[in-house]
Amino acid sequence: MADSAEEKQRRIVEARLKLRERFFEKMKQSPAQSDEKPQGAGPANRHGMPKLPIGQHETEKWPVLDLGVKPEVAQDTWKLTIDGAVEEPVELDFAQLLKLPQVEEQSDFHCVTAWSLMDSTWSGVQFSTLAALARPRDDARFVMTYAYDGYTTNLPLEEALKDDVLVVYARNREPLSREHGGPVRMITPQLYAWKGAKWLKRIEFMKEDRQGFWEVRGYSNSAHPWRDDRYS
């Protein structure tokens, strides 16, 4: 007998929690979780860091930044491939993404160009849920994300598996616009926003680190806002 939808979701959640447990100590030791002298201003944020990282100013508008290409990707043609150092490569369409455990999370968005968009509500799927589907091998330590416009960016798994790293399709309960990476993009609230690819197309798990588009052009490989960690 085939598993029910509820049983499939329960197994995904269990696999996600086991995967996060493997990297939990590294997550706790990351700068956004453990920095004793974070640089910034304002009351503590959700993780105990100053609300506004050093060098940032708050904005109410959401500026548009990209490589000069805004691909047109419809929901009904969007696909996400998850592969690399995994036990079970996965390909998802938008309808399948919506069948996974869904979350709605409030977080901040810090751009390396010195603006911060605060307290957005994002709808989507935790990155760790997608990772659980593909089951990264024991030697997987990093991830590269790819966009439909050719953009790439890399992350260590201890950053990617944090609970607020999401693959999202809506902000403030409105579908993501094409300009902001719709139909689906990734967000990385504890790092500068370039670490979250717009128009997400592929997630590759890796044994060794490789730099993405901006990283090879002099941007920081680690990208921690509360350390003013903008450039290498």
Image (cartoon, helix red, strand yellow):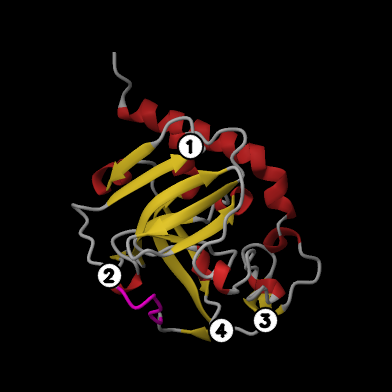
Q: Position of residue 230 (x, y in %)?
A: 63, 76
As helix, strand or loop, the secondary structure at mark 2 comes to helix
N-terminal-most mark, 3 or 1: 3
N-terminal-most mark, 1 or 4: 4
Residue 114's disc is: 4
Q: CA distance from mark 4 to mark 3?
A: 9 Å
Q: Are marks 4 and 2 in contact (CB under 8 Å)?
A: no
As helix, strand or loop, the secondary structure at mark 4 comes to loop
As helix, strand or loop, the secondary structure at mark 3 comes to loop
Q: CA distance from mark 1 to mark 2?
A: 28 Å
Q: Identity of the amino acid at label 1? A: Ala
Crowd tier of the residue under label 2, counting other residues whose Cα lies within 10 Å: few below 14, some 14–19, many 20 or above: some
Residue 181's disc is: none
Q: Residue sitting at 49 percent across and 33 percent down? A: 135
Q: CA distance from mark 3 to mark 2?
A: 30 Å
N-terminal-most mark, 4 or 2: 4
Q: Position of residue 32 (x, y in %)?
A: 68, 63
Q: Identity of the amino acid at label 2? A: Arg
Q: Identity of the amino acid at label 3? A: Ile
Residue 175 figure quarter: bottom left
Which segment is the magenta one?
Answer: 63-69
Crowd tier of the residue under label 1, counting other residues whose Cα lies within 10 Å: few below 14, some 14–19, many 20 or above: many
- Kindly identify which residue carries mark 3: 54
Q: Nearer the viewer, residue 15 or 212?
A: 212
- Kindly identify which residue carries mark 2: 178
Q: Is residue 67 magenta?
A: yes
Q: Which image quarter is the C terminus in? A: bottom right
Q: Position of residue 129 (x, y in %)?
A: 46, 42
Residue 132's disc is: 1
